[in-house]
Image (cartoon, rainbow, N blue to C red):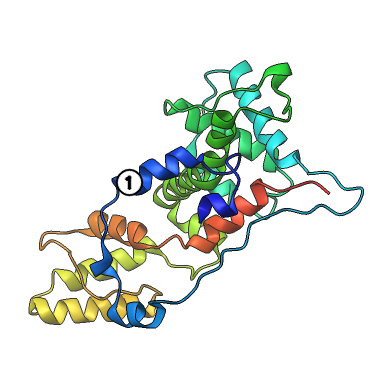
């Protein structure tokens, strides 16, 4: 179905699909019985995928060209040092779209410093169509998956290094982690029964915007351990990552 819908230039070739299906176990037992009964004997038609340009229009490769330029820049300027925590804060600011090329360059340089890289194009890093399948697939994977990982890593670094500023930029409740950790420590070290302490801690956390179903705190935890837990427990929603990514990878009209 994937091959039928997407051409090899955007996906993988037919032989790779054949090998993948041949290697997979036939796990019919995983399909709910109600679905089997409802669909058994039914005819399925899969329409061929296609892209149609309007008259006089051309495919816009500008977003790809930006990434090609970024890779070329990183090759010409090796050893650039990027602070992921500071950069994570910048990704939450309202000027991401205006600074997207600079930020995309920073994100890629940081990723490259971790031992990763994308292949460069010839002709002084200018995208020339058609391009090699292997090269295009690696760029597609970077935009589809790796860029998400980079954004999350930088947001996590910012969250841990600058919790107050991170919360403010994220637009969530302004929690004073230090003050909250102090209050929770006093309660956690009180002579109350463990069950009572957990219930009260969870009640306080809920009032401060934390959705908690259970606690895994150690008996000897103090302010620092509780504060670190509070920071790490704050969830970075997928829509935040998607919004940042959308502003970094856009087509120019």
Relative height, residue 89 to residue 125 (above, below): below
Give the side of residue 68 with respect to residue 53, left or right.
left
Residue occupying the point 42% across, 50% down: 156
Q: Nearer the viewer, residue 150 or 226?
A: 150
The residue indicated by pointer 1 is 22
Instruction: Estimate how packed mark 1 is, as few (under 14), some (14 to 19) or many (20 or more) residues with alpha carbons within 10 Å.
Output: few
Name the image quarter holding residue 222.
Answer: bottom left
Coordinates of residue 14 in the picture (x, y in percent): 49, 41
Q: Position of residue 150 (x, y in %)?
A: 48, 42
Q: Is residue 159 above or below residue 210?
A: above
Near-viewer residue (215 or 30): 30
Q: Residue at x 82, y 52 (%)?
A: 53
Q: Does residue 118 appear left or right of residue 57 in this picture? A: left
Q: Secondary structure at mark 1?
A: helix
Residue 64: x, y in percent?
A: 68, 37
Residue 179's image quarter?
bottom left
């Amino acid at each position: 179905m994937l091959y039928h819908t997407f051409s090899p230039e955007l996906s993988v070739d037919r032989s790779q699909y054949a090998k993948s299906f041949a290697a997979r176990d036939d796990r019919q037992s995983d399909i709910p019985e109600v679905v089997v009964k409802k669909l058994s004997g039914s005819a399925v038609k899969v329409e061929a995928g296609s892209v149609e340009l309007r008259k006089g229009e051309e495919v816009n490769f500008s977003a790809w060209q930006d990434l090609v330029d970024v890779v070329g820049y990183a090759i010409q300027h090796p050893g650039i040092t990027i602070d992921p925590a500071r950069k994570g804060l910048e990704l939450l600011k309202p000027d991401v779209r205006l600074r997207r090329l600079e930020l995309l360059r920073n994100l890629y340089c940081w990723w490259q410093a971790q031992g990763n890289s994308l292949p460069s194009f010839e002709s002084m890093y200018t995208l020339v169509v058609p391009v090699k399948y292997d090269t295009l697939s690696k760029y597609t994977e970077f935009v589809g998956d790796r860029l998400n990982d980079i954004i999350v890593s930088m947001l996590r670094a910012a969250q841990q290094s600058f919790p107050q500023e991170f919360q403010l930029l994220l637009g969530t409740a302004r929690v004073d982690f230090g003050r909250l950790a102090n209050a929770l420590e006093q309660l956690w070290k009180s002579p109350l029964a463990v069950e009572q302490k957990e219930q009260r801690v969870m009640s306080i956390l809920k009032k401060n915007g934390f959705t908690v179903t259970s606690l895994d705190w150690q008996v000897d935890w103090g302010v620092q351990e509780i504060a670190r837990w509070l920071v790490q427990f704050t969830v970075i929603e997928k829509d935040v990552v998607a919004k940042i990514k959308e502003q970094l990878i856009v087509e120019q009209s």
